[in-house]
Image (cartoon, rainbow, N blue to C red):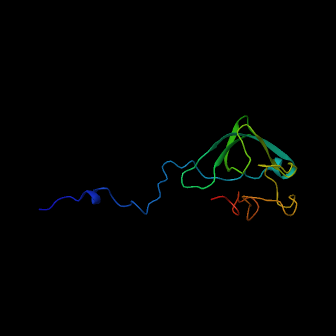
Amino acid sequence: MGKYVQAQRKGKGGIFKAHIRTRKGAVKLRPLDYAEKHGYIRGVIKEIIHDPGRGAPVAKVQFLNAYRYKRDTELMIATEGMYTGQFIYCGKKATLTCGNVLPLSVVPEGTIVCNVEAKTGDRGAFARGS
């Protein structure tokens, strides 16, 4: 009659299947809005966490919503020098410091950058630390 093979009872998958149960989420920049195109918006880094399957740490950043009375939480790739409790600024008129998000046209030549958008508003594509 035969026996059930234990390895076959586990189902398909195994070595070639990504273990995504403990992943933290998609890492993106803020969606572009009026405040970011014409000025800047302030956010605070709540925590820096490790995301399994990713080489770079992830920063959980909290922004005030510009249109409703609530807070928006975004996951961004943490740059070197970021710390919890740090204020970061996103927008055209933000200063050039570690962690801030600026348009590439405002950044001077020779500056080290990461997480650059390929097209405006695609929320980061090039030079990401995985």
Q: Is residue 31 left or right of residue 11?
A: right
Q: Is residue 122 left or right of residue 103?
A: left
The residue at 47%/54% (across/down) is 19
The residue at 73%/65% (across/down) is 118
Compared to residue 79, the image places residue 73 above or below, namely above
Residue 2: name its quadrant.
bottom left
Residue 116 horizontal/vertical position (percent): 74, 60
Residue 121 horizontal/vertical position (percent): 74, 58
Residue 67 horizontal/vertical position (percent): 76, 40
Q: How many labels does the image show?
A: 0
Residue 120 visible (yes or no): yes
Residue 98 horizontal/vertical position (percent): 79, 49
Residue 64 visible (yes or no): no
- Outermost residue to the left: 1
Q: Is residue 110 left or right of residue 16?
A: right
Q: Which sits in the foreground, 12 or 127? A: 127
- Outermost residue to the top: 69
Query: In which quadrant is the N terminus drawn?
Result: bottom left
- Outermost residue to the front: 81
Compared to residue 98, the image places residue 71 above or below, namely above
Q: Which sits in the foreground, 115 or 72? A: 115
The residue at 73%/34% (across/down) is 69
Query: In which quadrant is the C terminus drawn?
Result: bottom right
Q: Which sits in the foreground, 19 or 41? A: 19
